[in-house]
Amino acid sequence: MTPQTEEAVNMFSKELALHAYRQMLRIRMFEEQVNELYTRALMPGLAHLYSGEEAIAVGICEALKKEDYVTSTHRGHGHCLAKGATPNLMFAELLGKEAGYCHGKGGSMHIADPATGNLGANAIVGGSMGIATGAAFSSKYLNNGLVAVCFFGEGALGQGLLYEVLNIAQLWKLPVIYVCENNLYNEYTHYSETTAGDICARATAFGVKAETVDGQDVQAVYSKAKQLIDDARAGGGPAFLLCNTYRYTGHHVGDINREYYRTKQEEQEWKTGRDPIQLHGERLLHEGFTDKATLDALESEVREEMKAAVEFAIATPYPALEEVEMHVYA
Amino acid sequence: MPDTTDRELTFAQAVREALAEEMRHDSRVCILGEDVAEAGTPFKVLSGLVEEFGTNRVFDTPISEAGFTGIAVGAAMTGIRPVVDIMFGDFLTLTMDQMVNQAAKIHYMSGGKWKVPMVLRTTLGASRRSAAQHSQSLHAWLCHVPGLKVVIPSTPADAKGLLKTAIRDENPIIFFEDKMMHHKLKGPVPTGEYTIPLGVAEVKRVGKDISLIATSSMVQVALGAADMLAEIGISAEVVDPRTLWPLDEKTLIDSAKKTSRAIVIDEGYGRYGVTSELASVISEGAFYDLDGPVLRMGAMHVPIPFSPPLEDLTVPTEKMLFDAAKKLCSKS
């Protein structure tokens, strides 16, 4: 361990470690409820679950300020929660209700919230790369010290927009972090079939510094993100962070029979040996930050929080029909 | 609008003056595009702006239309008012995801929480011997998308007043300039501060026998045809919608009701195009007052050819409009 990373790890205090655990658990339990809603046919549309990837959103958002910007993806519930969104308003949005973050007009794939710097989830793969870079452009233009994080999956490496904005961000030294969540599958296709060459070399070709981190280790993600974010905030320019992870469920909730593209054994290995919540929980116990009974109680507490949020969303009304023509223009 | 003076500006000078005034007013206004700074664009529309405002306000970008348009979308959401320069309207195709799926929808998808106050300036128009990828008039594509506004001025004075309004607007706006008008078209431009609201058509010439509804450089074609028609005793009214969305339907319909005949002329393709939409608005709104079908004239439905005699066939002319108007008036 280099002295620099040792220092970063030390910054992951007991308080932060416990908070990160809770945040990851909240994402897992949120998605558990989404799956339930979907399979009970209570949720319209599509649901792309983030389960298995929680350490990335939490590790990175814990290293951000509340005012900092994020852009998210179709698999975005974890990013929204990690950045500070409220489950009640998220579930209301998922069900198309008036109380939702976007008055029910965006849905699962478009949650946006200025109060937490969430510029919006995006259902075009790679679609938010320009927006995140533009937020970083504003930050530099206005000299307000904010940083933008652009989350995207490895499937988005196929989009040309990434290479256009990497080039510009490096030329103009913009404070933006491109976070590639490699969950191994572009929808139903292993990334090795779609991705030539080395992933990080794509960024370093432009002179953008690139790092790779175990996306199942929240402390490692946080430590690496903290360095890159602090550096960007100080004027050091953009960075690229590759987070290796795994998508526990299908591309979306309806993707049940997955054996034509991956084995159940592979899924099981990740879930039992590489689970970010379990790994971090073990660390908390090892460090003596908490005990098993407290973690069990926390799980029950968070599950109840999410159930209550679902009940709120189910009970709250749909938008008035007149809303259909509202917000087309500002 | 303040009193007009004897001062005349070219279309390009009027655009530049609008940008300079808004940049002086508001430090959040900046320009992004290819060769917009020292080069002042290949059309020299922006010459002088970098000298006044510096490279911290006028940004030369790489040749990455999707990239810098996307950056403008994100910048507009977070406190900047960018004016993007897309050199040739043909290159709009490269920005389409950013404009259509991002800029146009962000306000709606976020339930009104985020806004995208940006202007994308670009060009249209053939006749420059630039062939099929530098000559198209693709403004109809953007008009089709809810969430976008489309401005298409025909005179230097309109260009200045409408561009200032567009920069102050809270929505994504595409501003089309016919590249053939930049330096060839001169006109009176008021000296004082003024803006022109979006969604207000202007009658460019009053008449009583036929309405010629024209956009951008086709307004000059319509005015020329109106002169020719006057010589044979036909009084043509020329109406310029000035903005395609919002659209001043009432002024178009009222003119057609008054004259009982209308021809719509626009340099885009007629099929599924701007002329189709305007003709249908007029037909629906003025049907019982019309003495004939509402006709359409647009670019010939071919890729714009390079060869000069071929290219000239593709763009509506005064003579073509005169003939069509004369025929329409003789039928009733």
Image (cartoon, coloured by chain):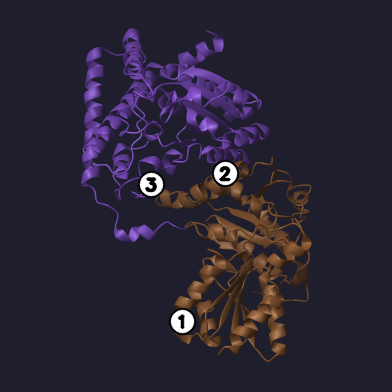
Chain colours: A purple, B brown
Task: Please identify, in this view, whether the residue under mark 1 or under mark 3 is nearer the observer.
Answer: 1
Q: Are the residues tagged 1 and 3 within 8 Å (C-beta)?
A: no
Q: Residue at x 41, y 32 (%)?
A: A79
On the picture, is A198 further left or further right than A181? right
x and y percent of residue B181 in the render? 73, 65
Which chain contains the residue that carries disc 1? B
Q: Amino acid at mark 2?
A: Gly
Which chain contains the residue that carries disc 3? A
x and y percent of residue B105 in the render? 46, 51
Q: Label 1 crowding class (10 Å Cα cut-off): few <14, some 14-19, many 20+?
A: some
Q: Is residue A261 visible?
A: yes
Q: CA distance from mark 3 to mark 2?
A: 20 Å
> Quadrant where the N terminus of chain B lies?
bottom right
On the picture, is A234 further left or further right than A25? right
x and y percent of residue A132 in the render? 53, 38
Task: Please identify, in this view, whether the residue under mark 1 or under mark 2 is nearer the observer.
Answer: 1
Q: Residue at x 62, y 43 (%)?
A: B68
Q: Is residue B178 above or below residue A4?
A: below
Q: Are marks 3 and 2 on the same chain?
A: no
Could you tell me how many numbered marks the image carries?
A: 3
**Label drawn at residue B287:** 1
Q: Residue at x 48, y 30 (%)?
A: A155
